[in-house]
Image (tube, helix red, strand yellow):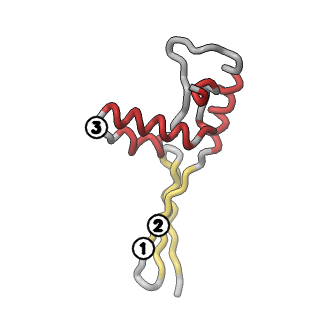
Amino acid sequence: MSTLTIDEGFERGIRTQVHFDGDEQIVFQRTFDVEPHLKYAEQARQATEGQNWGEGRLVGHIPDAFLAPIMLIQDRREREKAIMTFLRENPAFVMFDKFLKA
């Protein structure tokens, strides 16, 4: 049994590969590198350390791969709830420490 892989490359940080095996099975594999996003959030968190709440404060960063399904939620309250849930479950993406304590 031989396997053929087609690498479609990166688009918006997501790498797509298509694997074909000898049993007529096709597997789509998508991988996402979150490391640059985690570094961005960490730098912002360090820059806001010790600051107070203010107008227009960025409290978190959600990479496109995670944000896209959230943005499909039509109800504004449910969408905001999904954003808050994501940031609480993924504190490494929080950019303002006081957000987690609120």
**Residues marked 1 and 2 touching at CB (< 8 Å):** yes
Q: Amino acid at mark 3?
A: Gln
Dot 2: what SS?
strand
What residue does disc 2 label? Answer: 18
Residue 37 in percent (x, y) is at 60, 38
Q: Is residue 27 left or right of residue 87?
A: left
Residue 18 in percent (x, y) is at 47, 66
Q: Residue at x 55, y 38 (%)?
A: 88
Say if 55 sits above or below 21 in the image. above
Residue 20 in percent (x, y) is at 46, 75
Depth check, mark 1 against mark 3: the one in front is: 3
What residue does disc 1 label? Answer: 26
For the residues labelled 1 and 3, the Cα–Cα distance comes to 33 Å
Depth check, mark 3 against mark 2: the one in front is: 3
Residue 70 in percent (x, y) is at 39, 41
Which mark sits nearer the N-terminus, 1 or 3?
1
Q: Quadrant of the C terminus?
A: top right
What residue does disc 3 label? Answer: 74
Say if 21 sits above or below 8 in the image. below
Q: Residues within 10 Å of mark 1 (few under 14, many from 20)?
A: some
Which mark sits nearer the N-terminus, 3 or 2?
2
Q: Amino acid at mark 1?
A: Ile
Q: Amino acid at mark 2?
A: Val
Return the residue found at the far front: 102
Q: Is residue 96 left or right of residue 67?
A: right
Say if 102 sits above or below 7 in the image. above
